[in-house]
Amino acid sequence: MPSAAAQLLLQSMLNKQLYVVFRTARDLKLLDELLESHLQWAVAAEQRGELFASGPFVARDAAPGSAGGMSILRAGSEEEARAIVSADPFVGGGAVDVEVREWQLMEGSFTMTIRLSNQTSRLS
């Protein structure tokens, strides 16, 4: 059981339930063939508010996608997260295997700068 001080710290943190999807490459040839439709799926999922973040792991001197990847989904349950990711052509097309895990987002930060005068933005 966390100490009283730790419990106070935990109460003030975000405590946002998300789902992390770990992708493991199964067939690199299929990754190339399905990349465009996978990217279209990702953009649509992002626009629907389902996809928080996503991208491949990077391995030096390895083919793109061969190290797998990760997506973070907004979903109300693990079943809903699995339904979202099952629509990904990489998954349905057999290019990757996936593991879905519930994740509690607690702490971290990001900074966004928007300049109206020249219509630029920066996220860090």
Image (tube, rainbow, N blue to C red):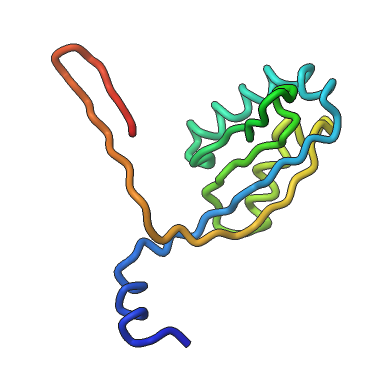
Q: Nearer the viewer, residue 95 or 65?
A: 65
Q: Is residue 97 above or below residue 93?
A: below
- Indicate the quadrant containing the C terminus: top left, top right, bottom left or bottom right: top left
Residue 15, x across and y down, in percent: 41, 64
Compared to 73, does 107 lie above or below? below
Q: Is residue 37 left or right of residue 9?
A: right
Q: Is residue 55 left or right of residue 1?
A: right
Quadrant location of residue 28? top right
Comparing 45 with 53, the one in front is: 53
Q: Quadrant of residue 6?
A: bottom left
Residue at 58% from the left image edge and 33% from the top image edge? 55
Q: Is residue 107 left or right of residue 44?
A: left
Give residue 85's position: percent from left, percent from top.
68, 42
Please tell me in which quadrant of the rendered image residue 72 appears. Answer: top right
**Placement of 6 over or under 47, stated as above or below:** below
Q: Residue at x 84, y 20 (%)?
A: 29
Residue lying furthest front in this view?
Answer: 61
Which residue is found at the position 56% from the left and 34% from the top?
45
Q: Position of residue 103 (x, y in %)?
A: 55, 59
In the picture as drawn, the residue positioned furthest to the left comes out as 117
Q: Position of residue 98 (x, y in %)?
A: 75, 45
Q: How many marks?
A: 0
Q: Which residue shows up at 77% across the image and 18% down it?
A: 32
